[in-house]
Amino acid sequence: MTERPVASASRTAVFYVAIFSLLWAMLPTLLFPNPPLDVVEGFAWGRDLALGYTKHPPLQAWLLEASFHVTGGHAFGAYWLSQICFVLAYVFIWSLGRDVGLSRPQSLLALVATSCSFYFTLPAPEFNPNILQIPVWAGMLLFFHRALRRGALTDWLILGLLAAAGLYAKYFAALLIGSIGLYALVFADARRCLKTPGPYVAMATGAILFIPHVYWLLETDWLTFTYAADRSMPAETWLDHLLYPANFLAGQIGSLAPVLLVLAAGLGLSGLRALLRARPNLVAAPGTQPDLRFMLWFTLAPLAVVLLVSGVTGREFKQMWGASMFTLIGIVLVQLVANRTAVWSLRRALGAAVAIQLLFLGVVTAQALVEPMFKSKPTRIHFPGDALARVVTDAWRQATDLPLAYVAGDMWPAAHATLFSPDRPSLFTDHTAAVAPWIDPQDVQTRGVLVLWTGDSEVPTGTLAEIYPNRIRDGFADIPYAAPAEWPPLRVNWIIVPPGQMPEL
């Protein structure tokens, strides 16, 4: 590769990350009338700080609640949280690339290629546990690599802290923790660390920090696990044992296609031909170079486990669960190709990365401004959440002359009331204490609850119908969507349950 001066590559990395992180944060801030699904749900949970929530551990909800206060009561903080996660991941990726011997231009190439992965682009506005895991995985791998190389207790301590953070984000982080443990057992040079106090400091740190959440799980009868089990779908036929892992693998390959495009652009036709003709550098070949072996292990081992578990159990893994699994892909590919050829053009690769980023940013812009003009079904980001919250809060206050303390019913409208109402009520999920153990039913009885659902039905449906049999709505409103579209207005219905009148659950 024809390398520019060292300082130029470093400055380019800073400018590239700063410019596109700002664009990815600013566009949804300015163009999205309403936050995406996972963001609204996370805000609703974070309203009541707890050690865990129905679907996930609490870190996403905690951070969203913090952003709500930092931004003066707005929801756009979620978009900036995503970019903070990505910036941290880029810092870790750059640092690890330098630690494994990549030059600064090569580290820049690895960084910009990784940034074009699907998971770093279009899903970015939907800050959720999958995005939150990306910097955690990158950081854990950086400090585990440093701990093996230097043996410093500080590195092991940080590894333990990040492992706990990963579990507080999503239990999927256990996959990386297990892969780290297995790596330390399988390879002789890594096994030497087991004779030092470092790994045990890391394990003790992570375990101590995670104990409060384990206590919460015990107190709530393992709520997040039982919730997931109730909603998981077993394989219907033997073919699902093959199709589910194949579908997951195909999705991950597709998500990495832009990364390959950036590298292909950097190689060009002459570079690609040289790559095909060249023999690999055996001194640096996979399996003989510890750093490359490290990278390959933590890129392929978690994927292999997911495919194996999906194939054996017949359970389907969601594509987005792979978001954090390929944070090293840019470093791995640059290492592999560098072992075969030095024919590179960093300028072409950077140009391709910029073009891909602009393309994805254009898609996000079109989702906000153009999609409503031709899509027949309303989109989440155009849901009139703010207007809904004002309408139902006014209805409650007029009927009771009290601030709105609790909302229940359909999650989507109720969560918006929790987020946008000036009273910031708590979400009584499913109107059931079993799935909202942080809510005190006696306090709900004391302060009353507003029950919400959408649609044309004058009576609540599902679980709400069982709680309020034969109860007709107390009011409704038709609210236009926040989009230049010919969608019929949203109909929101409510039942006002004043203090002391909630049925026994």
Image (cartoon, rainbow, N blue to C red):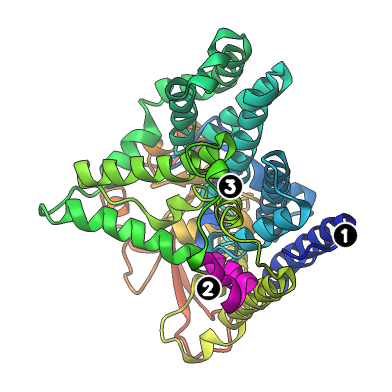
Q: Position of residue 156 (x, y in %)?
A: 65, 21
Residue under pointer 1: 5
Which residue, as the protein is rendered here, is positioned at the far left?
A: 237
Quadrant the N terminus occupies: bottom right
Indicate yes or no whether the magenta region holds residue 271.
yes
Residue type marked 3: Ile
| Mark 3 → mark 2, Cα distance in angstroms | 34 Å
Task: Characterize the local packing of mark 2: few (<14), some (14-19) or many (20 or more) Cα atoms within 10 angstroms.
Answer: few
Give me the disc on residue 99: none
Task: Characterize the local packing of mark 3: few (<14), some (14-19) or many (20 or more) Cα atoms within 10 angstroms.
Answer: many
Helix, strand or loop for disc 3: helix
Indicate yes or no whether the magenta region holds residue 266.
yes
Task: Characterize the local packing of mark 1: few (<14), some (14-19) or many (20 or more) Cα atoms within 10 angstroms.
Answer: few
Q: Measured along the vertical axis of the image, is residue 314 above or below residue 105?
A: above
Residue type marked 2: Arg
Quadrant the C terminus occupies: top left
Nearer the observer, 488 or 364: 364
Give me the disc on residue 134: 3
Q: Position of residue 85 (x, y in %)?
A: 67, 49
Helix, strand or loop for disc 1: loop
